[in-house]
Amino acid sequence: MQSLIKILLLVILSISISNAQPNKMVERIKTLKKIRMIDYLKLPEEKAEKFLIKYSAFASRTEDKNKEIEEAIDNLNEHVSNKAIAEIKSSTAKVEKLQAELLSIEQEKNQAFKQMLTETEFAKYLIFEKKFATELRKNILKLRERRDR
């Protein structure tokens, strides 16, 4: 079953990358991640629905915060290029503040999931998040290597 999922992931990624539609690729990966997560956690249907609603809300908040961080870093980069020390200090503080807010969202998400899931389900959630990210990175690198050959 797990090798089938890896093959499916590779196919989805290769189709998405070859079509060069980043937004569709990201959406497909997000959808696949949710499907695999629910399958891995083995949540009952009602609990899975509630979990996915919360998960999606936190994912949206995280994406928004990451966009803010990217913008702030771009701004910081401009100030560094211009060697504007006062602006560098201000922009650096903004980046640090946004990073702290991102961490706070992650902690809030973990607390919400701890309340919603059993100990075992929460542990499996943490494991899944790490494994999925690692597997995704590896598969993307493999696809790039194949494409570059």
Image (cartoon, rainbow, N blue to C red):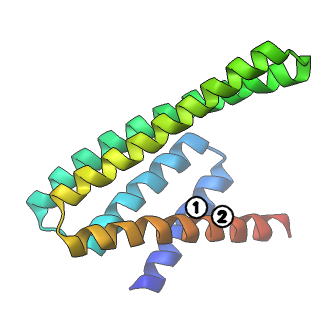
Q: Earlier in the sequence, mark 2 or mark 1?
A: 1
* Residue occupied by mark 2: 140
What is the distance, in whole Å, between disc 2 and disc 1 at their CAs? 7 Å
The vertical placement of 41 against 19, above or below, is below
90 left or right of 96 in image: right
Position above or below: 23 against 12: above
Percent x, y of residue 81? 89, 23
| Point 44% across, 40% down: residue | 62
Where is residue 56, by image quadrant? top left
Callout 1: helix, strand or loop? helix
Vertical comparison of 79 with 95: above or below: above
Q: Nearer the viewer, mark 2 or mark 1?
A: 2
Q: Amino acid at mark 2?
A: Ile
- x then y, percent, for residue 35: 33, 63
Q: Is residue 145 left or right of residue 1?
A: right
Q: Write down the residue under mark 1.
A: 13
Instruction: Count residues near mark 1 (Cα–Cα under 10 Å), then give few for <14, some for 14-19, many for 20+.
Output: many
Contact between marks 2 and 1 (CB within 8 A): the answer is yes
Element class at badge 2? helix
Q: Amino acid at mark 1?
A: Leu
Report crowding for label 2: few under 14, some 14 to 19, many 20 or more residues within 10 A (C-alpha): some
Residue 41 lies, in percent from the top left, at 26, 71
